[in-house]
Image (tube, rainbow, N blue to C red):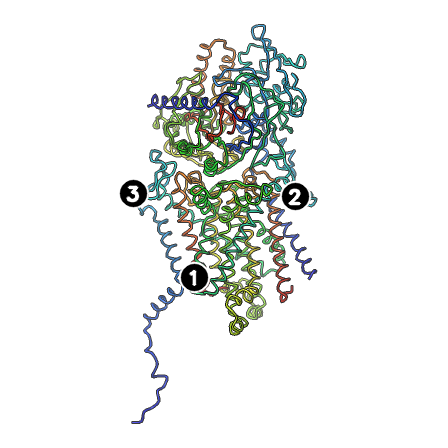
């Protein structure tokens, strides 16, 4: 009947069940990264609004009704109408399709092209010299001037806007990838793999790419955010997507003359644009923290 | 409906006209001096008035050049630089004597030779000038102040040609500058007008500066249109180019500028409510809108396809979209404008979409994309483009609407290539009434094919009719021929008029002496 | 050190060469044609062909590049196709406005952004930090022209405190000059400010976790002194880098801002030239702007070397 001193095992908590563990992780993630979740949720809402636009009490984005032009927001027209009588609410929702498409396309394409180029350039010394000078040169030209010049060469279309916005973004991705490749090239793992006779593409895929995924994803979100903003700038300056297909940028561009008369034309697409870009940036920041990217 | 809107239209123009003329107090009551800050409708790029028909260049030239004759508010031709003139031999020989005291900005006196060379250069490019030249046997200076013009065939429009108010205007330049070949631009800007151009302060895309010409000797008559005494009450005129319309309007309201040439109609309606600002009609004769098809390229090289365009148009719809405010526009089927001396409804059609569809089918249209140029920076043409897209799609065209800015349209419209290689099928434009008011000046009804205005329609009959018109001596005959011309023009569908409107202009009430004329006039105005 | 600087300088030459050739190439791939616009409304194809020959547009590409590069080296940036004025004159006319706008914006951004970043770093993970960072992120998520119109509407149109548009050169007086630049500069600065705040915060966080900071606090020094004299002094460098990189962003924003506020700057000059295909102006301006950007980055690199004795190339 001697009292034994307490042992660590006495203080152990009961082992959590597996299911409770998953929920717990999620809840903890939410509390630690509220902005990431908020941003992601906002994006989902806007995406759904755009993709399923016809379902959200919208009309025809192209329909002109001059009899009700320049009407302020009301029960029939939630965001008012523009100078051609078109419904701003409908156009804003449909506009998210273009803006989001541009963002996603520019981001994906610049990542794919930039990474490929960066990997190749990082591995083959001789290409490196020339390619990096060219990349530096391209980066020296302010992105918007480059995009504008490119748009001036081509006719206005969504595809061409994507091309014009993607070219200034590629050099940065190339740098990122190349830096990674350069540092890993000398790594023992790679040396060992070479010694074993592994060929270059395999080395790239197995050793270099995995480490790049996280920073590329983060970079991708920033590129998407910047592309969506830049599409608006190009439209504002008259060199963006074709005007009869609404995008947030060109709705605001057309509303330029009506700042005092009908500010709602600029206000609502602007809010959507700012919210989307903000959401993407928050997601990017959150991912950066989550994935521990520097 | 048309009658009602027409009454409103004319009433509106009349009210504004009286208000405007009421704004001209007796000359001695006007203040002298000061700087006028003016917002032009475009950026001044080209300084040569023969080189381009652009209205901005014309406006610039009215400041620094003078003309032999001018057009007054009632479309009457009156002498300006000319003092006396006479015609002999049933109008086959004309003699003109210049006024005293005319000097170039560099101090040299203006001589008859200068006038002769200027007329020659102008007549190489301008349609009315070419017509005059085709009828002229000889034009030469007799002495320092007199020159003569001898016709080879009768021509009833000699004075109308020399006093032509709008593009291209036969401005008078020094002979050595007028000797520049018409394929190049003039390099110097020496004129004899009431203002001088300050080239050192010219910042393209931003501002243009003019100062009063102290050597200018105005006539003694009252100013009217481009005639009469051009008395200058300002020291400086500064053109500030503000491309953003809301910013320009706000600048006018804040007093940062004095005169805003072409506010959009919506903005003008708003400005009407501002007690410090006067909204007037610059040119009550109005402006005409065009839908111009390209006659060289398919599908519009086929007459039936063009007629499909004619029958699809509902002018009311176009005007609503392009302009928005009914009190400033009216429908008008007349090629030579409603309210003009040759107004007629001959050959006009009513909208009939089914007929348009049938015509398109009959033309054998193959469904290939039709390139429609859409200048999005000009609400007027942008609205017309959007409506066209809708109607053309309804009729069965496969529309490729291409957005661009006006300067790109100007570059692209000159291309005769197929649309896929940089050409075009449909474009939109507008001309002020003075430029389309009779068969001699109207660039759109030229059937000269590849040397006609962009669109290049080809029709020999209309060319004959135009010459007949130019030679006709009585008004009744002229009217009858003009009707015939309109019928041909519409049947051929050289262009489809989409309506007529007047453009408001807005200035602060501290500016007085505003004159109505197609171009903004800077003499007679003063800043309080 | 001079050697290092010299080497860095030499490295910029091939970069500028690439920029020059890229810009030239860009414009000459186009089917769009300045000759058509210059030729005027009644031009025949002969006229256009003659003008093209005169402008040298028919020469083989390599020859044109060569001619152009030769002129650049001699300082001749060519003549505007449209106004007939030398490109260098046009640039000179517009430089004051853009430099005034950009410097003013940078001043505001740094003046507000750095303290905000420091504050956020010091109060890390608190509400203040989150708010500041949210504000910063919102800053560069907003379209510049939207913000511009908003500010114009509130401060110029409604309250009449500031002018709606326009520009007064410095020669007209310091106060008019500044007054017309306040709204545009504030509009432009928001984006830059956000970046600087974030960078300052990140950099400060890095420094604040260092041992010597803990020592300073342990010594009993006032927080403000520690923050500014010890931490900030060491956190400066990445912020300086961001200033250099951010310059490109500023130029982009300036293009749009100049359009909203009708400022006669390089941004608007370039946009107009691009739309009209005024090749010499486009080439000249992009070359000059890129040159300035490269120069700024060079200065930043040099500052790095000078300010941080630990770094040696």
Q: Residue furthest bottom?
A: A1
Return the mark for residue A75.
Answer: 3
Where disc 3 sits, the SS reads loop
Q: Do discs 2 and 1 share a chain?
A: yes
Q: Is residue B220 left or right of residue A83?
A: right
The Cα atoms of the two marked residues, 2 and 1, are separated by 55 Å
Mark yes or no: residue B522 visible: yes
Q: Can you give x and y, in whole percent of width and height, for residue B28 in the image?
A: 53, 21
Where disc 2 sits, the SS reads helix
Q: Chain of mark 3?
A: A
The Cα atoms of the two marked residues, 2 and 3, are separated by 61 Å
Please give the residue where the numbered disc 1 appears in the rendered image: C128
> What residue is at 65 percent from the left and 43 percent from the top?
C65
Give the mark nearest the N terminus, 2 or 1: 2
Please give the residue where the numbered disc 2 appears in the rendered image: C65
Where disc 1 sits, the SS reads helix
Mark yes or no: residue B402 visible: no
Q: Can you give x and y, in whole percent of width and height, for residue A226 in the image?
A: 48, 52
> What residue is at 63 percent from the left and 50 percent from the top?
C16
Q: Can you give x and y, in whole percent of width and height, for residue B252 in the image?
A: 47, 35
Q: Chain of mark 2?
A: C
Asked if disc 1 and disc 3 are in contact, CB closer than 8 Å, the reply is: no
Quarter of the figure that contains the N terminus of chain C: bottom right
How many numbered marks have been drawn onto this rendered protein structure? 3
Name above or below for residue A200 compared with residue B273. below
> What residue is at 37 percent from the left and 46 percent from the top?
A93
The Cα atoms of the two marked residues, 1 and 3, are separated by 39 Å
User: Viewer-nearest of labels 1 and 3?
Assistant: 1
């Amino acid at each position: 009947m001697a009292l034994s001193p307490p042992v660590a095992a006495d203080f152990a908590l009961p082992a959590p069940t597996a299911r409770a563990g998953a929920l717990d992780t999620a809840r903890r993630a939410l509390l630690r990264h509220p902005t990431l979740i908020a941003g992601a949720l906002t994006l989902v809402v806007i995406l759904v609004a755009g993709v399923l636009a016809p379902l959200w009490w919208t009309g025809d984005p192209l329909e002109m009704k001059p009899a009700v032009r320049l009407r302020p927001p009301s029960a029939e027209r939630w965001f008012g109408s523009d100078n051609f009588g078109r419904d701003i609410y409908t156009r804003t929702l449909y506009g998210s399709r273009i803006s989001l498409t541009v963002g996603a396309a520019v981001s994906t394409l610049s990542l794919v092209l930039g990474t490929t180029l960066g990997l190749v350039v990082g591995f083959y010394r001789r290409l490196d010299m020339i390619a990096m000078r060219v990349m530096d040169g391209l980066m020296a030209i302010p992105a918007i001037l480059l995009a504008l010049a490119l748009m001036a060469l081509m006719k206005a279309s969504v595809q061409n806007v994507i091309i014009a916005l993607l070219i200034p973004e590629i050099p940065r991705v190339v740098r990122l990838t190349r830096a990674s490749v350069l540092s890993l090239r000398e790594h023992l793992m790679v040396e060992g793999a070479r010694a074993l006779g592994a060929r270059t593409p395999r080395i790239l895929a197995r050793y270099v790419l995995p480490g790049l995924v996280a920073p590329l994803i983060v970079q991708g979100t920033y590129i998407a955010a910047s592309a969506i903003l830049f599409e608006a700038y190009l439209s504002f300056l008259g060199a963006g997507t074709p005007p009869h297909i609404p995008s947030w940028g060109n709705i605001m561009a057309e509303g330029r003359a009506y700042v005092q008369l009908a500010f709602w034309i600029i206000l609502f697409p602007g809010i959507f644009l700012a919210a989307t870009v903000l959401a993407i940036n928050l997601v990017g920041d959150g991912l950066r923290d989550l994935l521990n990217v520097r | 409906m048309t009658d009602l809107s027409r009454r409103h239209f004319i009433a509106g123009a009349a009210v504004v006209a009286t208000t405007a003329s009421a704004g001209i107090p007796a000359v001695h009551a006007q203040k002298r001096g000061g700087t006028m800050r003016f917002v032009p409708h475009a950026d001044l790029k080209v300084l040569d008035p023969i080189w381009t028909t652009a209205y901005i260049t014309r406006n610039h030239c009215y400041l620094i050049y003078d003309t032999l004759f001018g057009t007054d508010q009632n479309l009457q031709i009156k002498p300006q630089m000319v003092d006396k003139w006479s015609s002999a031999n049933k109008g086959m020989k004309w003699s003109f004597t210049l006024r005293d005291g005319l000097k170039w900005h560099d101090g040299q006196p203006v001589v008859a030779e200068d006038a002769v060379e200027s007329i020659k250069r102008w007549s190489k490019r301008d349609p009315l000038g070419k017509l005059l030249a085709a009828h002229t046997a000889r034009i030469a200076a007799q002495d320092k102040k007199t020159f003569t013009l001898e016709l080879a065939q009768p021509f009833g429009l000699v004075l109308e040609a020399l006093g032509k108010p709008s593009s291209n205007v036969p401005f008078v330049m020094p002979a050595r500058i007028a000797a520049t070949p018409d394929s190049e631009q003039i390099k110097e800007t020496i004129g004899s007008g009431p203002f001088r151009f300050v080239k050192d302060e010219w910042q393209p895309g931003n501002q243009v500066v003019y100062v009063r010409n102290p050597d200018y000797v105005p006539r003694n008559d009252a100013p009217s249109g481009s005639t009469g005494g051009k008395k200058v009450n300002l020291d400086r005129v500064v053109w500030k180019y503000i491309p953003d319309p809301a910013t320009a309007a706000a600048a006018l309201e804040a007093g940062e500028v004095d005169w805003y040439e072409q506010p959009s109609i919506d903005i003008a309606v708003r400005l009407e409510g501002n007690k410090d600002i006067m909204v007037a009609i610059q040119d009550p004769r109005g402006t005409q809108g065009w839908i111009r098809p390209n006659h060289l390229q398919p599908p519009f090289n086929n007459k039936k396809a063009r007629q499909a365009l004619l029958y699809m148009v509902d002018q009311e719809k176009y005007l609503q979209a392009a302009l928005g405010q009914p009190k400033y526009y009216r429908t008008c089927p007349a090629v030579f404008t409603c309210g003009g001396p040759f107004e007629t409804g001959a050959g006009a059609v009513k909208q009939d979409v089914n007929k348009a569809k049938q015509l398109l089918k009959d033309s054998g249209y193959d469904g290939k994309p039709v390139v429609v140029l859409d200048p999005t920076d000009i609400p007027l043409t942008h609205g017309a483009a959007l409506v066209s897209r809708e109607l053309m799609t309804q009729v069965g065209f496969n529309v490729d609407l291409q957005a661009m800015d006006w300067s790109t349209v100007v570059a692209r419209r000159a291309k005769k290539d197929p649309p896929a290689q940089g050409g075009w099928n449909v474009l939109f434009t507008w001309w002020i009434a003075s430029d389309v008011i009779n068969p001699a000046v109207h660039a759109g009804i030229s059937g000269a094919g590849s040397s006609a205005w962009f669109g290049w329609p080809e029709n020999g009959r209309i060319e004959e009719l135009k010459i007949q018109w130019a030679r006709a001596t009585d008004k009744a005959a002229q009217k009858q021929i003009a009707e015939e011309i309109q019928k041909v023009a519409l049947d051929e569908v050289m262009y489809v008029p989409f309506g007529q409107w007047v453009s408001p202009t807005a200035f602060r009430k501290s500016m007085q002496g505003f004159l109505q004329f197609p171009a903004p006039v800077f003499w007679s105005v003063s800043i309080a | 050190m001079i050697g290092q600087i010299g080497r860095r300088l030499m490295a910029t030459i091939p970069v500028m060469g690439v920029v020059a050739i890229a810009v030239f190439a860009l414009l000459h791939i186009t089917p769009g044609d300045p000759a058509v616009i210059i030729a005027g409304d009644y031009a025949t194809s002969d006229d256009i062909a003659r003008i093209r020959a005169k402008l040298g547009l028919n020469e083989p590409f390599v020859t044109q590049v060569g001619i152009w590069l030769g002129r650049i080296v001699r300082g001749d940036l060519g003549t505007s196709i449209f106004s007939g004025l030398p490109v260098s004159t046009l640039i000179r006319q517009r430089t004051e406005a853009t430099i005034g706008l950009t410097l003013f914006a940078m001043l505001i951004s740094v003046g507000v952004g750095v303290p905000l970043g420091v504050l956020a770093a010091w109060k890390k993970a608190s509400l203040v930090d989150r708010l500041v960072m949210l504000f910063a992120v919102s800053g560069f998520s907003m379209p510049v022209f939207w913000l511009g119109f908003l500010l114009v509407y509130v401060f110029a149109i409604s309250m009449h405190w500031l002018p709606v548009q326009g520009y007064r050169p410095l020669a007209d007086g310091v106060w008019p000059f500044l007054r017309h630049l306040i709204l545009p500069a504030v509009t432009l600065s928001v984006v830059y400010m956000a970046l600087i705040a974030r960078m300052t915060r990140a950099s400060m966080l890095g420094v604040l976790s260092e041992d010597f900071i803990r020592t300073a606090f342990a010594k009993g020094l006032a927080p403000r002194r520690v923050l500014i004299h010890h931490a900030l002094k060491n956190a400066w460098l990445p912020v300086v880098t961001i200033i250099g990189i951010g310059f490109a962003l500023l130029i982009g924003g300036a293009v749009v801002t100049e359009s909203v506020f009708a400022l006669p700057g390089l941004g608007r000059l370039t946009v107009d030239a691009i739309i009209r295909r005024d090749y010499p102006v486009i080439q000249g301006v992009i070359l000059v702007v890129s040159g300035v950007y490269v120069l700024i980055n060079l200065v930043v690199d040099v500052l790095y070397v000078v300010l941080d004795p630990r770094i040696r190339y």
